[in-house]
Structures are given as structure tokens and as C-alpha cells.
Amino acid sequence: MPSLKYLTGYPEPLQEQVRQLLAEDRLGALLQRRYPEAHEVRSDRQLYDYTQDLKDRYLRKSVPLNKVCYDNKLEVVKHALGLHTAVSRVHGGRLKASREIRVASVFRQAPAAFLRMIVVHELAHLKEADHNKAFYQLCQHMEPDYLQLEFDTRLFLTELAHRGG
């Protein structure tokens, strides 16, 4: 029975359906049919521009972003798919804040919808620190299909783990 670490909070009948799809080697094909469109956001600069465009559209008045990049170590080290950080440093008598978003490098090759979901998630943390009702409402404001995309991203990661990649 394969481990479904990305689906631990979901009901057992749903997990059993996923196990069945994995056993029949159909999960990857299902996701490929549902999300055939790849993205062109390959470099850190392109990721910064992509993220900034979404931020300008939905969170114009939020704090500025200093850095957005793909991170090769993110999933292993932090057990996360994206990470937002705020670092404050003292410069003379002034306090300078720096905001960063890091996206797990697995999303460099993921379908476009999954990259958008991760970026929307991390941008929502600029306004809402916790995963509460307001956080998810903001995510759904920026991406109406957010909840389905989050689940399908978990399926995508489960498929990758099953294949050993």
C-alpha cells in the first residue's frame, strides 16, 4: 500500500481511490489530460515577473517583494512547496524589511495551473499569516479554482513520489 503523505488529511475512501489509480498506473495520465498546459516560467527572473504580475493585480497595496526564486532544497528541508519569509535588518537607525517567496523547484516542470496555485498561496501569506478562513477566501479571490488546484497539486506530487521522482 503506497504512502500518501500529501493526502494525509483527506478521507480514507478518497485515499483508496488514489491508491487504486496508482496501482493501475492511471493517475499520471488523468492529471495530464486535466492539465495539459505547461508553463514557460523557467528562470528565477521569469518567476519574479510572474509573481509580481499576480501581486500587482490582486494585492497592489501589500508590502513589496524583494526576491522570488525556485529553491532546489525547499521540499526536503522545509517539507513545504513554497515559502514566504520576512527578514528585518537594522541599517543604522532604520529597520529594513525584506520579503521573499521561494517555490520548490519541482514546479519548474509542473503544469501551469499548479505553479499559479503555489504562487497564489504564497502571495496570500503577505496579507494573512495563518491558514484560516480569510486566507483561503483570499486564495479563492485570486484563483477561483484554488481548492481543486490544491488537491490536484497534491495528486501530482503523489504521482511524482510514486514514480520515484
Image (tube, rainbow, N blue to C red):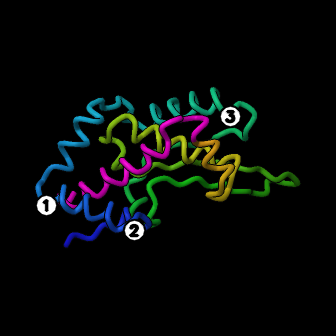
Q: Which residue is mark 1?
A: 23
Q: Which residue is mark 3?
A: 59
Image location of residue 60, percent across then percent down: 71, 30
Q: Residue at x 40, y 36 (%)?
A: 113
Image location of residue 102, percent across then percent down: 50, 50
Q: Which residues are magenta?
A: 140-165
Q: How many marks?
A: 3
Q: Quadrant of the N terminus?
A: bottom left
User: Circle 2 — which element?
Assistant: loop
If you read the primary sequence from the N terminus, does the residue marked by circle 1 or circle 3 appear first? 1
If you read the primary sequence from the N terminus, does the residue marked by circle 2 or circle 3 appear first? 2
Query: Which amino acid lies under the numbered mark 3 shown in the image of this protein?
Result: Leu
Q: Examine the image and state in which quarter residue 107 appears.
A: top left
Q: Residue at x 65, y 31 (%)?
A: 58
Q: Which residue is mark 2?
A: 8
Point out the residue furthest to the front here: 13
